[in-house]
Image (cartoon, helix red, strand yellow):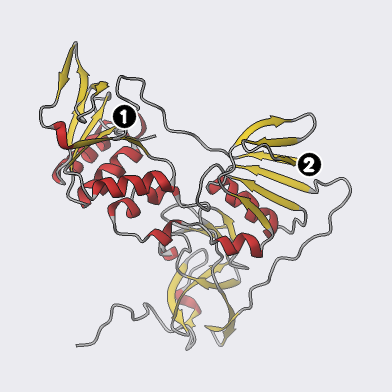
Amino acid sequence: MTDTKNEPSGPDLVKGVSLSRIADGAMLLGHAHNEPVLLARRGVELFAIGAICTHYGAPLADGLLVGDTVRCPWHHACFSLRTGATLRPPALDPVSCWNVEQRDGSVYVGEKLARAEPQRIPLKEDKPHAVIILGAGAAGNEAAETLRREGYGGRITMLSADASVPCDRPNLSKGFLAGTAPAESNSLRSRAFYIDHDIDLKLNAPVASLDAKSRHVQLADGSRHGYDALLLATGAEPIKLDVPGATLGHVHYLRTLADSRALVAKALTSHRAVVIGASFIGLEVAASLRARNVDVHVVAPDAVPMEKILGADVGNFIRKLHEQHGVTFHLGTTAVSIDAQSCLGFLMGNGVHGDSSCPSRDVEKNG
C-alpha cells in the first residue's frame, strides 16, 4: 500500500497548467520541485509562492488575496506575492518565491528565486542612533526584526524581565501545556538569531526607572542604558487575585514560559485543578489540562463563557464542547478564598460555598 500522506497536492506546476484554470483574483494550489506552491493571478500578473504559512503551517490556499498580498486564513499573517516577505505578523519568516512563465496559453513554474537579504541603510544625523525596546514579547520582537528588515543600522537593545528568549505566548496555554508541542517550539527565535542580527537581547533585566528627559533607563541591577528612541512593549500582566490564600504556593498565574513550565510540572502530579476565568486563556488551559487527564473545574462570574465577546449562542456551544471533554463549570461564581489544602471557597448568589473534593486540587489563575 502506497503512503500518500506526504505526496504533493494539485498539479505539477513545473509541467504547466492552462492559464484558463486560474481566474483573475484566484489561487491554484499545486507543487513544484516537491514543494507545495500557490499560484496566484492578479490581472495579467502571475505569482508563485510557498503554499504554507510560516507561522503555524496554515494552508494559504484557504486565505485571501488582497492586492498583491495573500493573507493567512488562521491568524491573518500577510505575505507579499512579489517577494514572499512577511508584511504582517504573527508570521516571522517569509515564504519562498518561484519564477513564473507563460507560453502558448499555459503557465509554468520554474526555479526558486533567491531571497534578497536586507541591506543596512547608513544612519543620518537626524535619525535615532540607538533604540531601546522595553519588553521581549511578540510585539517587541517584531519591532526589533522589522527595524533590521527595513535596513535600520543603529543599535537595538531589547530589555526583558523574563529569563527566556522571546517566546510564542499563545502556545504556553495550548500545545506546550497540553504536552503536544515540544519545548523548543516555544521560542520565536534562537539566541543565535539575535547575535547574528546585532540585536542586544538582555534577559533577566527588569527596569527600575525611566528618565525621559535625559533619555536613559535604569535596570534593577543599577546599570544604565541610554537611547535616542524608546519603544514600550511590555504587554499586560495577569490580574492578581485579591482574596485570602491568593499568594499560596499552589496558586499559579500564566504569562511566561517559566509559568507554563511550572504548570506542566504540577499537572504531571495533580489529579484536579481549578481554573479561575472562562475566557480564551482560561479555557485553553482547561482543555490542555484535560489532555493530561487532569480533572478540571472552571470558576467564572459570567453566566455564559465569553458571551460579551462571542455572544450567548457561541458561548453556550463552547461550554458544551468543553463539558463533552470532561470540564466542570461553576458559572455566576466568584472565588472568595483559597486555603492551604487547595480548597477553594466561592461566592454563588449570596452564600459562600466550598468544594469537599478539592484537597488534591491546584488553582490556576489566567490573565
Q: Amino acid at mark 1?
A: Leu
- Image quadrant holding the N terminus, namely bottom left
Q: Which mark is residue 14?
A: none
Q: Which mark is residue 248?
A: 1
Instruction: Decide: few, some or many residues near mark 2? Use Cα within 10 Å; few <14, some 14-19, many ≥20.
Output: some
Q: Residue furthest front?
A: 221
Q: Up-down: is 128 above or below 94?
A: above
Residue 90, position in %: x, y? 51, 53
Q: Viewed as shown, does residue 234 lie left or right of 302?
A: right
Q: Viewed as shown, does residue 220 lie left or right of 35?
A: right
Callout 2–callout 1 Cβ contact below 8 Å = no
Instruction: Decide: few, some or many residues near mark 1? Use Cα within 10 Å; few <14, some 14-19, many ≥20.
Output: some
- Image quadrant holding the C terminus, namely top left
Q: Secondary structure at mark 2?
A: loop
Q: Viewed as shown, does residue 108 lie left or right of 347?
A: right
Q: Up-down: is 341 above or below 35?
A: above
Mark 2 vs mark 1: give the one in front: 1
Residue beneath label 2, please? 228
**Residue closest to the eye, 345 or 6:** 345
Q: Residue at x 37, y 79 (%)?
A: 8
Q: Residue at x 38, y 49 (%)?
A: 172
Residue 265, position in %: x, y? 29, 49
Q: Up-down: is 337 above or below 328?
A: above
Residue 136, position in %: x, y? 56, 46
Residue 262, position in %: x, y? 34, 45
Q: Amino acid at mark 2?
A: Asp
Q: Up-down: is 242 above or below 1?
A: above
Give the Cα separation between the discs numbered 2 and 1.
43 Å
Q: Viewed as shown, does residue 211 lie left or right of 133?
A: right
Of the image marks 2 and 1, the number of the one nearer the N terminus: 2
Q: Secondary structure at mark 1?
A: loop
Q: Residue furthest right?
A: 125
